[in-house]
Image (tube, rainbow, N blue to C red):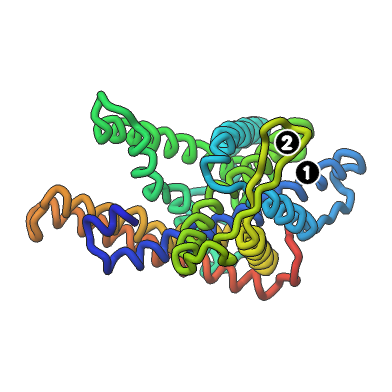
């Protein structure tokens, strides 16, 4: 937001702020849904392993959502993001673990079948599905892809931590190129192999489609759960910080509800104390409860991720970064580079719009058959 204010002016700050923090909250909702699905998948896989693949192993993820929310309430009491830096390392390692396992399982399933179940012809995919449903799902898939590239709001924070030489911007450009290229290659491989293995029946979360080997599938799902538990706080603490800073500034009296601090000392641990504020306990707990409730009302994995990606992709990843670059580089309106950027921005806007339509259509379709507070795996 500071970069937007410096380069584009204050009128853009409000819009970028709303989009950015709405995106962060949406990710928290998505994490809650995914954690419940992964936990329920572990329970169902164990049931199939014990009773056979034809057994009725219906599970509901709502209780797991409540447990996830309760755990996040406890973790949310960490004072700030600096206190949970180690969580980012854990999230990175676990995300690599479950993604690699999913890729290997997809390759193994495809090699056993000796044929690809998927087809590049949309009209031929998904027998029994209406053409309109297929189109909506294609649009929604664009949103899921866009969701994977909403990283621009982290770039400046990362660049601020770099030391020179080499120059921060040059190092960041090289790292970004390698990171995006590697991510695109890995995601494309996983998507193609998963589609070849499952075809039109590919689940939104690939891991829900595997039951053997049980130990490996459980490790992957456990890695997902750990990643989501710790990753949730990375996004939540950012929202907590901006709101608590605003409230503390709004009511600056030392004894006010938003500035009162209590220090809790642990006698069993030498020189260890923990600071608590009533406002932090109340507001953070309330926010996590609200997030969990929304996730319970709309537990649609693919559709929610697609909607989040479509809403945030164009403004946060394309529009604001491109316009800030053009201002900084002093690119004049009407020249060839300006026209190229405008065409790129327009194409990305179209992607965001059609993926939003597809995601909303899928949510409405799910609502017709969904049961309140129930997750279908």
Is 354 placed left or right of 253 in the picture?
left
Residue 14: which quarter of the image? bottom left
Q: Quadrant of residue 65?
A: bottom right
Q: Residues within 10 Å of mark 2 (few under 14, many from 20)?
A: many
Residue receiving disc 1: 42
* Residue 281: percent from left, percent from top: 66, 59
Q: Is residue 67 left or right of residue 341?
A: right
- Quarter of the image for residue 129 reads bottom right
Front residue of this view, candidates 86 and 322: 86
Residue 198 on image: x %, y %: 63, 45
Instruction: Name the outermost residue toward the right.
Output: 51
| Quadrant that contains the C terminus | bottom right
Q: Look at the picture and state if 101 lies above or below 339.
A: above
What is the C-alpha distance between the residues marked 1 and 2?
Answer: 8 Å
Q: Secondary structure at mark 1?
A: helix
Can residue 103 be seen here? The reply is no
Residue beneath disc 2: 217
Q: Secondary structure at mark 2?
A: helix
User: Where's residue 241, x and y in %?
Assistant: 50, 55
Chain-order first, disc 1 or disc 2: 1
Most extreme residue toward the top is 165
* Residue drawn at x 14%, y 48% as measured from the top left: 329
Assess whether mark 2 and mark 1 are in contact (beta carbons under 8 angstroms): yes
Question: Which is nearer the eye, 285 or 136?
Answer: 285
The answer to whether residue 24 is left or right of residue 70 is: left
Name the residue rendered at 77%, 60% in the picture.
62
Q: Residue at x 42, y 33 (%)?
A: 182
The foreground one among 292 and 46 is 292
From the top left corner, tell me how far across and down residue 192 is, in percent: 52, 41
């Amino acid at each position: 937001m500071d970069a937007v204010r410096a380069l584009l002016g204050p009128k853009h700050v409000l819009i970028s702020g709303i989009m950015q923090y709405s995106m962060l909250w949406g990710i928290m909702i998505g994490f809650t849904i995914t954690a419940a699905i992964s936990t329920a998948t572990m329970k169902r896989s164990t049931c199939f392993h014990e009773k056979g693949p034809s057994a009725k192993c219906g599970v509901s993820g709502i209780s797991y959502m409540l447990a996830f929310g309760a755990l996040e309430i406890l973790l949310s009491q960490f004072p700030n993001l600096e206190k949970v830096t180690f969580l980012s390392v854990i999230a990175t390692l676990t995300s690599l673990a479950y993604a690699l396992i999913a890729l290997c399982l997809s390759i193994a399933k495809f090699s056993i079948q000796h044929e690809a179940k998927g087809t590049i012809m949309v009209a031929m995919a998904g027998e029994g599905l209406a053409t309109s449903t297929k189109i909506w799902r294609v649009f929604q898939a664009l949103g899921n892809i866009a969701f994977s590239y909403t990283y621009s709001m982290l770039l400046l924070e990362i660049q601020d931590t770099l030391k020179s030489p080499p120059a921060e911007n040059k190092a960041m450009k090289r790292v970004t190129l390698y990171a995006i290229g590697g991510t695109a290659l890995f995601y494309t491989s996983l998507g193609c192999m998963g589609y070849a293995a499952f075809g039109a029946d590919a689940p939104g979360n690939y891991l829900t489609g595997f039951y053997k080997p049980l130990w490996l599938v459980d490790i992957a799902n456990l890695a997902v759960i750990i990643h989501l538990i710790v990753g949730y706080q990375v996004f939540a603490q950012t929202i907590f910080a901006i709101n608590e800073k605003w409230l503390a500034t709004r009511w600056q009296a030392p004894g006010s509800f938003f500035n009162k601090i209590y220090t809790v000392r642990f006698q069993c641990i030498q020189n260890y104390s923990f600071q608590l504020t009533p406002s932090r306990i109340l507001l953070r707990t309330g926010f996590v409860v609200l997030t969990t409730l929304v996730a319970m009302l709309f537990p649609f994995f693919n559709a929610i991720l697609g909607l989040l990606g479509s809403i945030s992709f164009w403004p946060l990843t394309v529009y604001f970064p491109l316009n800030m670059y053009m201002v900084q580089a002093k690119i004049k309106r009407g020249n060839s580079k300006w026209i190229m950027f405008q065409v790129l921005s327009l194409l990305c806007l179209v992607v965001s719009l059609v993926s939003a339509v597809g995601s909303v259509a899928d949510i409405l379709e799910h609502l017709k058959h969904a049961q309140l507070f129930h997750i279908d795996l």
